[in-house]
Amino acid sequence: MRHEVIKVFTKRNDLRHLDAPPPEHYHDYIMKGPENLPAEHAENKRSPLELKRAKYFSHFAAAHLKSFRLHRAHGVLAKSEGWRNVSEHCLVEGVAADVLAEALKLSDTERKNLVAAALMHDFFKRKEIAETKARGLAGQHKAEEARDKILEESGASEEIGKIVSAASDVKRMLDPDVTLPEKIMQYIDDITMNTEIRSVDERVDKVEQNPLYLEENESGREIFGGRTFSQAQRDFGHAIERELAEKIGIPPAQLPEFIREKIRQRIE
């Protein structure tokens, strides 16, 4: 099967040519790396549903390869680096963002920016975790500042930068000028646990129990009127869920399943 050449940026921002498989195998290429493609692309080793899922996510990733450049540059894309799960998580959030953008009838520009931000939002996660482990909340803030600067230098628009930040910036939800795409980004990150769409409570409960973010969690009390960061995140998550569900015309508790079902429909 004839391969094609894809151009991606290295972390020095120059072009490197990678020998990559045709579009139906981009999922394996992006998610597992070229060294782990099935022998001779053996589709018959997967179930029909698995093949459909791989094909859908493959084409989605192929259509947004530009958003994965920063993943590669900052060590969360290559399988050998051991952080592949971050790119997988971002890919799922990108698809969920596109589902909600379509359901909410966002403009083409809003949809494009939202999806790009969702795909990129955790590209600096490896450095963020390292800085948080080393310096606590101060290190986390330093990493976030560095992430924003890298985004700007990469050519990402100011709007994309704001949406990326909204994934973790619960304080931003207090701003009366917060945009709908920013709210959607916050919500999507509130319900995506690794690569699964779950409920707000399940996702926030898991983060709340992570000792790495204990200092950040307690720091929220001064910002959110005595509530911890996680308590505020949970409250905002449910508030955004109600707002989005009302716009779509479904009960709020059904929104995660609505997203899952729309993704299933796209796959099938």
Image: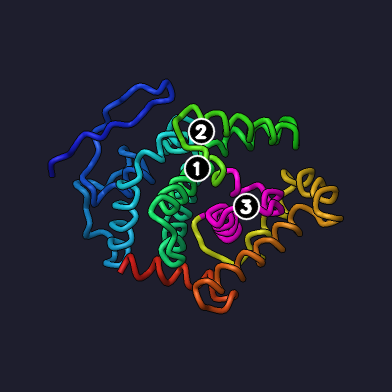
Q: Residue at x 31, y 47 (%)?
A: 63
Q: What is the CA distance from the residue labelled 1 to the residue labelled 2?
A: 9 Å
Asked whether the beta carbons under mark 3 and mark 2 sit within 8 Å of each other, the answer is no
Magenta residues, start to end: 165-194
The amino acid sitting under disc 3 is Val
Mark 3 and mark 2: span between their CA atoms?
A: 20 Å
Q: Tell me if 37 is positioned left or right of 246 in this view.
A: left
Q: Position of residue 120 (x, y in %)?
A: 48, 42
Mark carried by residue 151: 2
Query: Which quarter shows the N terminus?
Result: top left
Between tags 3 and 2, which lies in front?
Answer: 3
Q: Residue furthest left?
A: 2
Give the labeled residue for mark 1: 160
Packing grade of label 3 (10 A; few <14, some 14-19, many >=20) is: some
The image shows residue 94, relative to residue 257, as above or below, that is: above
Q: Are marks 1 and 2 in contact (CB under 8 Å)?
A: yes
Q: Please tell me in which quadrant of the rendered image residue 233 appears.
A: bottom right
Q: Is residue 102 left or right of residue 254?
A: left
Mark 1 or mark 2: which is in front?
1
Which residue lies at the image location 47% right of the left edge and 37% below the top edge? 157
Is 160 colored magenta in this rendering? no
Secondary structure found at label 2 = helix
